[in-house]
């Protein structure tokens, strides 16, 4: 049996015992010793010293148990099962240069990171993973239930992570499918976050295959239909300009909502846009919360049970006993005195 309580109360009990013992000189016997013999005999004749000692013992015991109760003593353990239920959730984040476009403030990538952070903060029991993609894709953070770590990893994402430029949605979907570690036919969600410029055109076919394994795919478009120029910063001179094509013309990155809506439809998911409105993430959060949750892990949680009330009850009984014990002697009357 485990016992947990502050050990300081043991020190306090020791002090109390010492103080009580040190006051024995002020006991009734000591006081009577300094009085006249007549007064001493008078009191000792009426007081039962044995019962008086028991009154002291009960008072002392009551004080000790009261102190134990006040210390909040906890004894034993209370075991209860804890079930964590949720889904496996993977974010596929576009880190191509086009995500630097500023039609969404402060730019597309920073807006996406902010909204993903809000989604993670709303999760309870779900596992989360992150994929980054541009011309190629990589599993950046495997599935984890450590949300703080996920947010830290998310903060470090930028458009220079993948040197191979482009927007290979097909590669992101393939990596996302392989990132799910279990073969369950449900409880798996992939959220594709991009400006939608698919450069390969295989995304729909891959999505249809993914749905056959139970994966739900939501898509999020980041940007505006009117589009925006793509800022480029020269690392040597730190001068900023805008990206141009091979002919020297400025490139305008336009949100391709059509492909993202098709992927969401094929993936049994929803499509939404991250724009300059606040709380854009709530539709995704609502869709996740409506899903059936699986038991990700079950463990036993043990904690100490409060037992101070029992010690308080014992203390009360001790004080009552000390109060009701009579100290006056019961004098036996002789039959000769009666007659």
Image (cartoon, grey):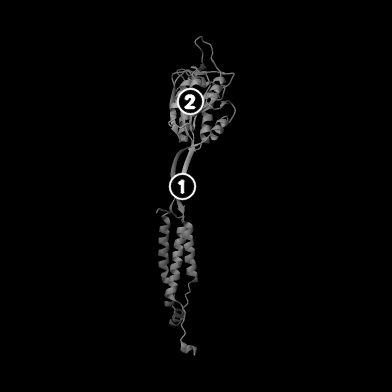
**Residue 231 vs residue 291, the one in the foreground:** 291
Residue 171 drawn at (x, y percent): 46, 21
Q: Relative to 95, is 308 above or below?
A: below
**Viewport quadrant of the N terminus:** bottom left
Residue 68 drawn at (x, y percent): 45, 58
Q: Relative to 241, is 291 above or below?
A: below
Q: Relative to 152, is 197 above or below?
A: above
Residue 129 drawn at (x, y percent): 46, 30
- Residue 255 seen: no
Nearer the observer: mark 1 or 2; the answer is 2
Farthest residue in the bottom direction? Answer: 339
Task: Give the SS element for disc 2.
Answer: helix
Q: Relative to 269, is 37 above or below?
A: below
Alpha carbon distance from label 1 to label 2: 38 Å
* Residue at mark 1: 80
Q: Residue 331 carries which label?
A: none
Q: In which quarter of the image is residue 29?
A: bottom left
């Amino acid at each position: 049996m485990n016992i947990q309580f502050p050990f300081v109360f043991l020190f306090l009990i020791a002090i109390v015992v010492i103080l009580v013992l040190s006051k024995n000189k002020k006991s009734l016997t000591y006081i009577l010793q300094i009085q006249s013999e007549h007064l001493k005999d008078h009191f000792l004749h009426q007081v039962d010293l044995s019962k008086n000692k028991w009154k002291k013992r009960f008072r002392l015991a009551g004080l000790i148990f009261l102190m134990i109760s006040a210390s909040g003593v906890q004894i034993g353990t209370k075991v209860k099962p804890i079930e964590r239920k949720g889904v496996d959730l993977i974010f596929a984040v576009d880190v191509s240069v086009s995500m630097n476009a500023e039609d969404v403030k402060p730019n597309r990538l920073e807006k996406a990171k902010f909204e993903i952070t809000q989604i993670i903060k709303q999760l309870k029991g779900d596992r989360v993973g992150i994929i980054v993609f541009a011309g190629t894709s990589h599993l950046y953070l495997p599935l984890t239930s450590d949300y703080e770590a996920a947010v830290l990893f998310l903060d470090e994402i930028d458009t220079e992570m993948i040197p191979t430029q482009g927007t290979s949605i097909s590669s992101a979907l393939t990596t996302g499918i392989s990132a799910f570690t279990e073969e369950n036919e449900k409880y798996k969600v992939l959220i594709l976050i991009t400006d939608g410029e698919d450069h390969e055109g295989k995304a729909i076919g891959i999505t249809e295959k993914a749905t056959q394994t139970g994966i739900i795919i939501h898509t999020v478009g980041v940007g505006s239909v009117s589009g925006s120029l793509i800022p480029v910063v020269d690392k040597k001179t730190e001068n900023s300009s805008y990206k141009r094509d091979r002919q020297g013309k400025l490139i305008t990155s336009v949100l391709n909502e059509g492909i993202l809506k098709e992927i969401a439809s094929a993936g049994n998911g929803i499509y939404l846009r991250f724009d300059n409105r606040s709380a854009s993430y709530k539709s995704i959060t609502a869709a996740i919360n409506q899903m059936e949750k699986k038991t990700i892990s079950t463990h036993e949680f043990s904690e100490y049970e409060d037992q101070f009330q029992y010690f308080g009850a014992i203390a009360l009984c001790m004080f009552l006993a000390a109060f009701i014990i009579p100290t006056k002697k019961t004098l036996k009357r002789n039959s000769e005195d009666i007659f």
